[in-house]
Image (cartoon, rainbow, N blue to C red):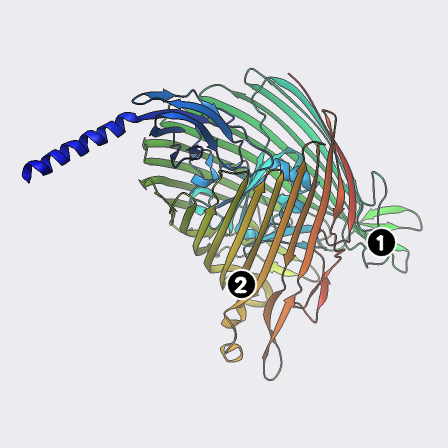
Amino acid sequence: MKHLFTLIWILSLLGAQTVIAQNGEIRGKILTQDNKSFEGINITLKDTKYGNTTNADGKFYLKAPQGNYTLIVSVLGNEKKELPVEITAGKILTLENIQLQENGISLQDAVVTGQFGKQSLRNSVYQVRTIDSERIRLRGATNIQTILNTELGIRFSNDPTLGTTDIQLMGMTGQSVKILLDGIPLVDRGATRESLGQIDINTIERIEIVEGPMSVIYGTDALAGVINIITKKGDGSDNLSVSARIQEETIGDEYNAFDKKGTHNENIGITWQKKGFQLNAGVTRNNFGGWQGDSTGRVKAWMPKEQMLYNAGIGYSKEKWNVWYRFNGTDETIKYLGNINVANTAGDKDYITKRWFHQAQGEYHASDKLGFTGALSYTDYSRKTLSTNIDFNTGKRTLSLDAAAQDKSIFTTVFFRGTALYKISPNVSLLPGIEVNNNNASGARIKGSPTINEYAFFVSSELKITPAIKLSPGVRFLKNSVYDAPPVIPSLNAKITLNNVLDLRMGYARGFRSPALRELYFDFHDASHSINGNVNLKAEYSNSFNTFLVWHAMQQSSLKVTSTLGGFYNIFHNRIDTGFDPANPSQTTYLNISLYKTTGVSLDNKFYWKNLQATLGATYIGTYNEILDESEGVTEGLPEFVWSPEINANLLYNFSKIGASINFFYKYTGKKPAYALISGTPVTASLRQISGYNMADLTVTKTLGKYINLIGGAKNLFDLTSIKNTTIGSGHDATGPGFNGRSYFLGMNIHWSKK
C-alpha cells in the first residue's frame, strides 16, 4: 500500500508538470496617450477565464495554455484594443508598449486631484467625479455654473443685490468648498465663491470633484470637498492651432443681437507647440444684458454684467521635467440701475472686479521612484463699489456722497506648495510637502492693512497592504500668525477591491476652515449696518466619515455600467456665524457659535453603450436643525435633521456617421425645509421651506467639414423664473442660476490646426 501511494504521487506530479509545461506566458506594458504608465488596465483573453490587471508600472503578466487567442486591453474612458496573440508552451511572449487613447464618449478615467500622480479613476483611493471637455462642450455653457448646476449634491444661490452666485456642496456652503485652478487655490473676498464665475470656460480641459474633507492635502476651506478646474495643456505634438467661438443666447424672451439684452459670448485662442515648447494666449468676452423679470423701471431682477477674461501661457517640457507659467486675468463690471425718483434722478452702482492671477508650476522626475513638484502663485484681487447719481434733466452723472457709497477692497495672496513623491517599494509611496500662504488686505471696510501668514507641512502615503487593499493615511501640521490653528489635521482613506467588479472606499478626515480676513478685520458702518470683525475667532473644524461601494459591470461587451452607492456624515464645530456682539448688543460681529451636521446617501449610475452615454442618480441629504440649540422647551420632539432629495439624469447620443449629437441634461432639486422660531407668547417653532424645482437643458451639435462645429438648443426647458422661499419673513420669491425663463442659444466653434 505504501508503494502504491508513492506511485500515485509521482504520477500526479508528472501530470502537473506536463500541464505546466503546456502553459505559456504573455508580458507587456500599457501606456497612457502621453506615454505614462497606466495602472489598473484590464487584460483578458477573449472567451476564456484568463485575465489580469496592470500594476503601478503599467506592466502585466498572464499565463495560459498553448494556443491562438485574442488579447483584450480595456478600461472605461479609453479605447478598447484587441490584439491577436499566439501562446507557445514554455515560452514568454513579450509585447511592445501598448498605448491607449482616451475615448470622448466615455468616462474621463485618469484623475490627478489628491492623487499620487495621474492614475486611473478605479485605482484612486478617493471617490472622484469628473466632467470632461466633451461634456463641457456639449452643454453650450458660457460659465462653470451651467456645467455644475445639474450635478448631484451641488446647488447654487444668487444674490440679486450684489450680483454674485454662491455654491453649496453636499449640504455645506461655499466657504467650506475649496476651488482650485490646476491645483492652486483661488482667492475670494468673503464667504461666497465668486471665483467660479470668473474662469474662462473655453480654457477648461476637465473638472474634478472630490467630496469630503481634503484638508491634509489642500488646507483650509476643504471641509465639504474640492472642485479642481484643470486647464488645457496641449497634446505635446508640434503644431499651430487657432480656435474661435461665438454664441448668442436669449434671456427668457429678452434678446438683442451681440449686445445688451441676452447673453453674448466671443472667444479667440491660439496655441503653438514645437519641440517641447508651448505658447498660448486667448481672450473671451462675456456680455450679459441682465434680466428684467417682474422688476419695474430701470431696476432688473438680474443685473447686467460685462466681463473680459484674458489668458496667456508658456511652457517647456523634456523627458524628465516640465515647467510652465500661466496668466489669467478678469475685468468684470456688474451694474445696478436704480429707479427714477420724483426729481427725475436715479442712483446707480457699478461693482468692479479685477483679478490678476499668475501661476508657475514645475515637475521633475529624477527616477521611476522619485519625483518633485512645485507651484508658486500670486493673486491681485480687488472689488470696487462705484456709486453715482444721474440727473435725467441734464444727463449729468456725479459721484454719490452718501456714507460708504464708495469702496474698494484689495486682497493679495502669495502661495507656494512643494511636494516630493518617493516610491519606497511597489507597495509603499510617500508624499511629503510644504505649503506657505501669505494673505494681505486693505480697504475702507477693512481695519488697517492686515497680513496673515500660514505655514504647513503635510505627509500622505499609499500603502498596498495586499493586492486588494490600499490605505492612504495622512497628517497636516500648521502654524498661523493670527489665530490658534488646529495643530494637527489627520485623515485615513482606504480602498478595498472586493472582487473584479466591486470596490469599496471608506474614509475619515478632520477638516478645518481658517477665519477669512473679512471675518477677522471687517469694519462696515452706515445708516443700515454696524458690522465688526472679530480677531478672536477660532478655526472651524469637522470630523467627517464617508463610504462608497462601486460596481463595475464586466467590460467584455459594448455595454458598460458603473454604479456607486455612497454615504457621508459630517460634524462641524466652532462654526463661524454672525451674531450680536456680547460687549455691545447694538453691533453685529462674527462668532464661533454654531454646531452643524450634515448627512446623506447617494446613488449614481453611468451607462455606456456604443454611441450612447447616460447617467441616472439621486441623493437624499439631511442638514442639521439649528434651532435645537436655541430653545429646548420649544424644540422638543423636532427632528435632528431636515431632508432634501435630488434626482438627475443625463442622456448623450452621438450620431457618428453624420457628425451630430443630441444631449439632454436634467435635475430635480427637492424642497429644502428649515425650522424657525416665531416670537410670541409662547415662542413657537414653524416649519418653512425653499420650494423644489426642475431644471433641464437640451442641446444639438453638428460638425461641418474639418474645422466648424455648430451647437444650439434650449436651456431651462421648464421656464423657471423663481422659487418660493418661506425661510425668511413671510415668504418671497428667490432667484437662482438659470432662473430667468426658458432661453434659446446658437453658437459656432471653429478649430484649425496645422502640423
Name the kind of residue labelled 1 in the image: Arg
SS category of the residue bearing label 2 = strand
Q: Residues within 10 Å of mark 1 (few under 14, many from 20)?
A: some
What percent of the width, then of the height, locates residue 541? 45, 55
Name the residue beneath numbered marker 1. 298
Above or below 606: residue 670: below
Q: Amino acid at mark 2?
A: Thr
Q: Residues within 10 Å of mark 2 (few under 14, many from 20)?
A: many
Instruction: Look at 26% across and 25% down and name the residue there.
Output: 21
Tell me what residue is drawn at x 40 percent, y 51 percent: 506
> Under tag 1, what secondary structure?
loop
The mark lying in front, picked from 1 and 2, is 2
What is the distance, in whole Å, between disc 1 and disc 2 at their CAs?
39 Å
Give residue 593's mark. Answer: none
Query: Which residue is at 84% across, 49% downward?
Result: 254
Residue found at the very far bottom of the displayed protein: 681
Q: Is residue 506 above or below residue 652?
A: below
Where's residue 266, x and y in %? 75, 34
> For the image shown, how many numbered marks are present on the structure?
2
Percent position of residue 645, x then y:
58, 61
Nearer to the camera, 643 or 271: 643
Q: Is residue 366 visible in this depiction of the protein?
A: no
